[in-house]
C-alpha cells in the first residue's frame, strides 16, 4: 500500500502540479476569482485526471508509440465532454461561472503531462493514485488561491462574509490583474523559502506550462533547429 | 456590417485581450517572451494558425456538426482539427516557403497546445458567429495576443538589466509586469462601443 500513499503525498506536496511544477497556469489564473470556482475547477480536473490516467494506463500496451499523443487527446477530450455535460446538468451555476474553461481542460498541461510522464509507464492502480494525488494537489492549490483572491477582493470566503464592514475590498484582486499579482507573490515566497519549483529552474524554450509538449516539443524544437 | 467587424476586432484584440483578461495562452506568453524578435515571430505564427483554425472550425461546425446534431462533440473535433491543421501548415510551409518556415517553424508545435486557439474556436461557436465574423474574431484575438507578448518581451528585455530583489527574480517579476499590463488593459474596458 505504501507506494500508493507515496503517489498521493507526491501529488499534494512534493510535486504539487500547480505550485511546484507550475502546470496548468491558464485555469489557475482564470477561474480562481472565488474559492468556490477554484474548488469546482479543481474537482472537475481531478475527475478527468483520474479517469484519463486509468484509461491511458490500461491501454498503454495497445496504443502504438507514434500516435500516442493524438490517442491521448481523444481520450481526454471524451472525458472532458462527459464532465462538461454532467456539470451542465447537475450544477448549472458552477457551469456558468467556469464557462469556457471547462472544455479547455482538454489542453490543461497537467493531464497530458501526467499521461506522458507517468501513466503510460505504470499499472492502472498506481496511475489512478497518481491522478488522485495530482488532482487533490491541484484542487487544494486552486482553492487556496481562490480563498486569497476572494478574501482580499470581496471580503468573503465561499460566499461567507469574513472581513468587517470597515474593510474596503480591493476589487482588483477578483479582476484579471489580481491573478497575476497573487501568483507573483506566491512564486516569490517560494523562491524566498528556497523551495525549488519549475519557475526557478526552467527548461529553455519550452518553459512556462507547456508540459504536455515537454518531450515532444523539445524533440520537435531540436529537429527544427537541426534542419 | 463593416462597423460590426471593426467592433469584433477592437473587442477581441484590446477589450477582451486573450492573454491579459481571458488568461488563455499564458504558457507561451510567459515562456516565449524573453526577446522581442522571437515573440513577434511567435505572434505571427499565432495570427496565421488562428485565422485558419477559426475558419475551419466554423465550416466544420456549420456543415458537419450542426446538420448531424453532434454539437456536443465540438471539443473533440476542434482539438483534433487544430492539432492536424498545425501539422499540415507546418509541412506546407516547409515545402512552399522555407523562409517563412525558418521564421515560424519552431513555434508551430508550441501552438498545438496553445489553449487560446481552441478557446477562440469555442467562443466563436458560443457567440453564434458566422464565417466572416469567426475569421475576424480569430485574427483580432491573435493580434491581441501578439500585442501583449511583444509588449511583455519589451519590458523583459529591460528588466534583465535592472537589479531586482532576489526572490522576485525570474517568474515573479514577469508576473508582476503582466499584472501591471493587465491593469493598463482594463482601461480599454471603459471604451464605449
Image (spheres, rainbow, N blue to C red):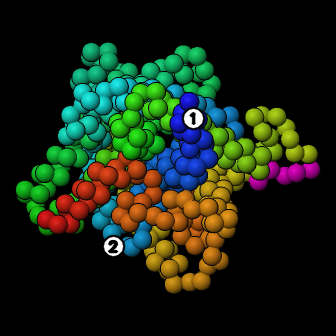
Q: Nearer the viewer, residue B30 or A96?
A: B30
Question: Is B96 drawn above or below residue A3 in the view shown?
Answer: below
Given contact means CB atoms under 8 Å apart, are the residues at marks 1 and 2 in contact?
no
Distance between the alpha carbons at the discs numbered 1 and 2:
50 Å
| Residue farthest along the left direction in this orientation | B95
**Residue identifier under label 1:** A2
Q: Position of residue B159 (x, y in %)?
A: 53, 78
Q: Nearer the viewer, residue B17 or A11?
A: A11
Tell me what residue is drawn at x 61 percent, y 28 percent. Answer: A94
Q: Is residue B86 visible?
A: yes
The range drawn in magenta is: A165-170
Task: Classify residue A106 as left or right of residue B177.
Answer: left
**Residue identifier under label 2:** B37
Quick check: is A68 in the magenta stretch? no
Task: Name which quarter of the figure residue B59 lies in.
Answer: top left
Tell me what residue is drawn at x 13 percent, y 65 percent. Answer: A227
Task: Classify residue B112 as left or right of residue B190.
Answer: left
Q: Position of residue B50 (x, y in %)?
A: 30, 48
Characterize the magenta stretch by its predominant secondary structure. Answer: loop
Q: Nearer the viewer, residue A75 or A91?
A: A75
Task: Name which quarter of the figure residue B108 lies in.
Answer: bottom left
Amino acid at each position: 500500500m505504501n507506494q500508493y500513499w507515496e503517489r498521493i503525498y507526491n501529488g499534494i506536496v512534493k510535486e504539487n502540479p500547480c505550485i511546484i511544477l507550475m502546470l496548468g497556469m491558464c485555469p489557475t489564473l482564470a477561474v480562481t476569482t472565488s474559492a468556490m470556482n477554484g474548488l469546482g475547477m479543481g474537482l472537475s480536473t481531478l475527475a478527468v485526471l483520474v479517469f484519463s490516467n486509468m484509461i491511458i494506463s490500461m491501454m498503454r500496451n495497445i496504443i502504438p508509440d507514434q500516435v500516442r499523443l493524438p490517442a491521448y487527446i481523444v481520450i481526454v477530450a471524451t472525458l472532458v465532454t462527459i464532465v462538461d455535460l454532467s456539470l451542465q446538468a447537475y450544477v448549472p451555476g458552477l457551469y456558468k461561472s467556469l464557462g469556457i474553461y471547462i472544455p479547455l481542460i482538454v489542453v490543461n498541461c497537467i493531464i497530458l503531462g501526467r499521461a506522458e510522464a507517468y501513466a503510460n509507464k505504470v499499472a492502472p492502480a498506481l496511475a489512478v493514485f497518481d491522478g488522485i494525488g495530482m488532482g487533490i494537489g491541484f484542487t487544494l492549490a486552486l482553492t487556496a488561491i481562490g480563498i486569497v483572491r476572494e478574501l482580499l477582493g470581496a471580503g468573503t470566503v465561499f460566499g461567507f462574509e469574513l472581513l468587517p464592514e470597515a474593510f474596503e475590498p480591493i476589487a482588483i484582486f477578483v479582476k484579471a490583474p489580481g491573478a497575476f499579482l497573487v501568483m507573483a507573490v506566491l512564486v516569490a515566497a517560494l523562491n524566498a523559502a528556497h523551495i525549488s519549483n519549475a519557475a526557478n529552474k526552467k527548461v529553455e524554450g519550452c518553459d512556462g506550462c507547456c508540459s504536455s509538449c515537454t518531450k515532444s516539443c523539445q524533440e520537435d524544437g531540436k529537429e527544427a533547429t537541426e534542419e | 456590417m463593416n462597423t460590426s467587424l471593426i467592433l469584433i476586432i477592437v473587442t477581441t484584440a484590446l477589450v477582451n485581450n486573450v492573454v491579459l483578461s481571458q488568461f488563455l495562452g499564458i504558457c507561451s506568453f510567459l515562456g516565449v517572451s524573453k526577446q522581442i524578435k522571437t515573440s513577434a515571430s511567435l505572434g505571427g505564427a499565432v495570427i496565421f494558425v488562428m485565422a485558419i483554425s477559426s475558419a475551419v472550425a466554423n465550416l466544420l461546425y456549420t456543415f458537419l456538426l450542426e446538420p448531424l446534431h453532434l454539437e456536443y462533440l465540438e471539443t473533440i473535433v476542434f482539438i483534433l482539427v487544430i492539432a492536424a491543421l498545425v501539422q499540415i501548415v507546418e509541412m506546407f510551409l516547409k515545402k512552399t516557403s522555407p523562409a517563412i518556415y525558418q521564421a515560424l517553424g519552431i513555434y508551430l508545435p508550441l501552438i498545438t497546445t496553445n489553449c487560446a486557439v481552441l478557446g477562440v474556436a469555442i467562443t466563436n461557436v458560443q457567440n453564434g458567429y458566422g464565417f466572416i465574423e469567426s475569421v475576424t474574431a480569430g485574427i483580432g484575438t491573435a493580434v491581441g495576443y501578439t500585442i501583449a507578448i511583444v509588449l511583455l518581451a519589451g519590458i523583459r528585455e529591460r528588466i534583465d538589466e535592472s537589479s531586482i530583489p532576489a526572490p522576485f527574480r525570474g517568474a515573479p517579476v514577469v508576473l508582476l509586469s503582466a499584472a501591471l499590463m493587465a491593469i493598463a488593459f482594463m482601461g480599454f474596458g471603459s471604451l464605449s462601443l
